Image (tube, rainbow, N blue to C red):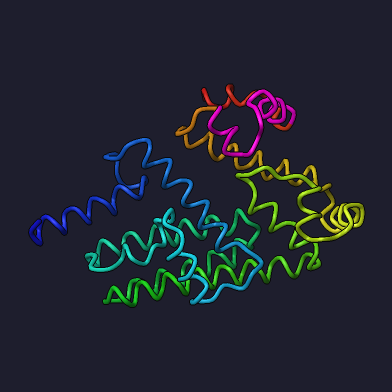
Amino acid sequence: MNREDNYISKKNNLLRANNSYTAEHTIGTKKWFNLNRININNLVFSTKKLTKDTYLKVINNNEQIIESDIKNYVNMDTELLRLYMAISIANLCDDAIANGVSVMDAEDLKRECLIELSQLKQVGSMTELSINMAIKYNSLYISQLNNQYSYCVSQAIEYIKQHRLTPCTPKLVSEYLDVNPSYLSRKFHDETGTTLTNYIKKEKMTMATELLNRKLYSLHEISSLLGYENYSYFSRVYKEYYGVSPSHNLKE
């Protein structure tokens, strides 16, 4: 493969990875990209302080992550990378707001990152911005959470968010935190105004709606992704929460 063919191949791979800017990829690629964005959320919106070393370690050890994979940036055209980075910044801002970061703080950081991005000339500088951006959004999230909840409750919230795509119950949360289930339930309700069960349901149903809106997955795939043992139970929970069946929303 000559240099021009190699460049075209890399360019096409990058564009295929972002379903907002191309219609030239398969449903499988779209599914992959959507789940990768969820993986990145789990990395950035964690109560654990994110550093450059931990960020790179996770990225290097997780082959599923595309959007923030530093290796994909090497030898890319700078203007193409700038576009890709701008999309990532906007996505991360939206995700920060969805995870409870104040709109003002999230938008201010987005503006700061976009201004810095517009002034960068080197690929290496852009990859450094990618890392710093993730760390800053992580810090915003931790600060927001710490201002609202005790350590125990914030850890419970993180566990629930990290397990939206796996089975999650109040018992599993309390076992993970190694605290008395009754104590955790009482403290969680006192600080959040809702029960652990309802909070888990809210996170699961919010994720279900996101997956439905993408129109990439079958109902049975969504049920499985969310960690439900069977579709019938997922459908019943969804209808109890939203008042309509998931099939009704999928048709809209």
Vertical arrangement, residue 100 with respect to residue 55, above or below: above
In the displayed structure, does residue 20 sit left or right of residue 158? left
Seen from the viewer's position, the closer of residues 63 and 117 is 63
Above or below, comparing residue 43 to residue 147 in the picture: above
Q: Main secondary structure of the magenta part?
A: helix
Q: Is residue 48 above or below residue 36?
A: below
Q: Residue at x 49, y 77 (%)?
A: 53
Residue 172 image offset from top left, x and y in percent: 76, 49
| Residue found at x 91% / y 57% | 183
Residue 174, picture quadrant: bottom right
Residue 174 forms part of the magenta stretch: no
Instruction: Specify start and end residues of the magenta stretch as a single range.
Output: 220-240
Residue 205 percent across, percent down from the top left:
66, 38
Is 230 one of the magenta-colored residues? yes
Q: Is residue 142 left or right of residue 43?
A: right
Residue 93 higher or lower than 57, as above or below: above
Residue pictured at 10% horizontal, 56% vertical: 1
Q: Nearer the viewer, residue 232 or 248?
A: 232
Residue 58, position as x, y percentages in the image: 49, 66
Image-quadrant location for residue 137: bottom right
**Residue 182 appears left or right of 159:** right
Task: Please tell me which residue lies in front, 140 or 225.
Answer: 225
Give coordinates of residue 25: x percent, y percent: 30, 40
Report how many numbered discs are placed on residues in the image.
Answer: 0
